[in-house]
Amino acid sequence: MSSECSIVGDEAALAAPEVRSQAHGVFWIAGHERLPDGARRVAEQLGTGWRVRELDADPPDEPPPTVEWLAARLLEEIVARQPRGPYRLAGWSSGGLLAYEVAAQLIGRDETVEFLGIAGAPLPAANAGARLAESIAHRGSGRAGDPGWAESALDHAFAHYEPFSLSIPVHVFELRSAGTVAAAPSEATAGWLARLPNGRLHRIDAPARHDAPSAVAQAFADAIAHALRDARRAADSTTTDRVRHAPERHYQPHLPIQRGAPGRGPIVVIPGAGDNVATFLPFSIEVDPAWPIHGLQPRGLDGVLVPHASVAAAAAAYLPVVERLAADAREPVHLIGHSFGGWVAMALACRLQASGRPPASLTIVDTEAPASGGRLGRQYTFTSVVWNLVRALETATGRPLGIAHDALLRADRAGQWAMLHRGMVDARIIRGASGPRDLQGIVRAYGTALRTGYDPAAVYAGDVTLVLAADFDDAEHRLAPDDVLAGWRRFAPRIALWRCPGNHYTMIRPPYVEHFAQWWQQRARGDSGMAAASAPTPARDLASN
């Protein structure tokens, strides 16, 4: 994607960078079907003191795999030009959907999004993804020479996009003829209403004098500029931090699991993708009750808040909790992270190391090495997220969900949600009284983690133990010991390896969690000073119990 950026409006800001930095910035994301001079018209309506930057959302030379991928590329361009919020985003047509996803990813980084405006951007039809997938599959290997391939792939990416709810106001602009009475919400707006919590959608009419493209563009520009000024005045009049920021910024991840006894360093556990701290309850039962145990619950499992969109953002949010636990106990913490949680534990350990208060121990449980090109950090459509979740749940519980891959691919979006819900109820994972909407938190959190990569900014100098599952019931989760150890050694030279009975999920569940708990306590008692060691040692393969 050759995403270009232009600055329009506020000529004084163009001439003086120091003045420009004080202007109210707006990012206008142009859709595949452009609104004639959309950004410039908005800038003219806003006047001085504002800066509107247009971002080109055209697909890159290679077919875009997902909307999330396109939005991530746009986000990097935005952050390069404006490192911190508040951010103001608006988009037309497909650019509106991209603006929505960019806003979600910014909130996932704990940035402030002051305004989000969407114009002419209906949600994809429920079954469009299945139709496009079938038609694109028929193109076969000749797709590279097909001039329409990029456009079809872009349509495919949008058809497979599932916009989850946001906790900020979303302004949806609808065109209507001047002089007519405001109509009821259109089918497109009704789709947004179904996605967003009550009170989050602000429907705004954009009256046009006639149907010419220039009149339509001017109508949207007038309405968007007016809404932007209103949002700016509302932000200026807000005095409390809690009101100015999205509720994600005030999320509290700390969940105490076991009180323990004084004199023991707290154990802090971090679950994997889409999982919760209850995963570590069997571990808390098996260890000495004198150990204080605390969980860090990933954000977004409630289906309301946006999950953290980067390992760094999650670690930054968790760090105050971990530091407080260590200060209250007057002992360094023991960090244990499972699967994706292993990356977060590593990032926390690096931050604690940088502050001069490294953890007492760092245990990474069946986590692929960072920046290794594994399963994490790739792009997944909504359907592939659901299918990966189905396989993970079946492996973790040992019970089938009764969902066939072909049937999942053929189903429309509502059907996919219904299949997943029915399968989880039949497998006794969730209650029968629940509904498909109750699954949104776990699906969103799981998908966000799958798409999130991690490249540590620092090398961790303390001792680390990598625990790998000895069984490989799921080939997708199989981690080759030598390869994963070598990958981790790039970021943690003092690393040791231990093989635990069980697979990726059952290793921390009965009956295998007993082995894990016994081994961990032996290590904690025998290596109480390992975090302070400085001389690198060769990686060790510790025999399994």
Image: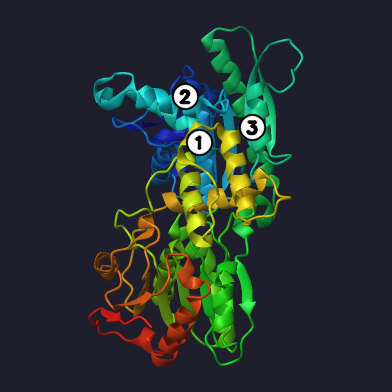
In the image, which disc is placed on residue 131?
2
User: Which-is-in-front pick, marks 3 and 2?
Assistant: 2
Badge 3, how many Cα within 10 Å: few under 14, some, many 20+?
many
Which residue type does callout 2 highlight? Arg
Residue occupying image coordinates x 28% and y 64%? 480
Q: Residue at x 53, y 53 (%)?
A: 400
Viewer-nearest of discs 1 and 2: 1
User: Which of the two discs, 1 and 3, sits closer to the camera?
Assistant: 1
* Residue name at image x 64 percent, y 44 percent: 168
Q: Are marks 1 and 2 in contact (CB under 8 Å)?
A: no
Tag of residue 454: none
Check disc 3 and report its element: helix, strand or loop: helix
Residue 438 vs 354, above or below: the answer is above
Q: Position of residue 487 (x, y in %)?
A: 27, 65
Q: Residues within 10 Å of mark 2 (few under 14, many from 20)?
A: some
Which tag, 1 or 3, sits closer to the chain's start? Answer: 3
Q: CA distance from mark 1 to mark 3?
A: 27 Å
- Asked if 123 appears above or below 485 in the picture, the reply is above
**Residue 497 x, y percent position in the rendering:** 32, 76
Tell which circle, 3 or 2, labels the residue nearer the N-terminal end. Answer: 2
Q: Quadrant of the C terminus?
A: bottom left
Residue 305 visible to an observer of this rendering: no
Q: Compute the Cα span from label 1 to label 2.
A: 14 Å
- Residue 325: which quarter of the image? bottom right
Q: Which image quarter is the N terminus in? A: top left
Whole-number angstrom distance, CA of label 3 to CA of label 2 = 22 Å
- The dot on residue 192 is 3
Q: SS for tag 2?
A: helix
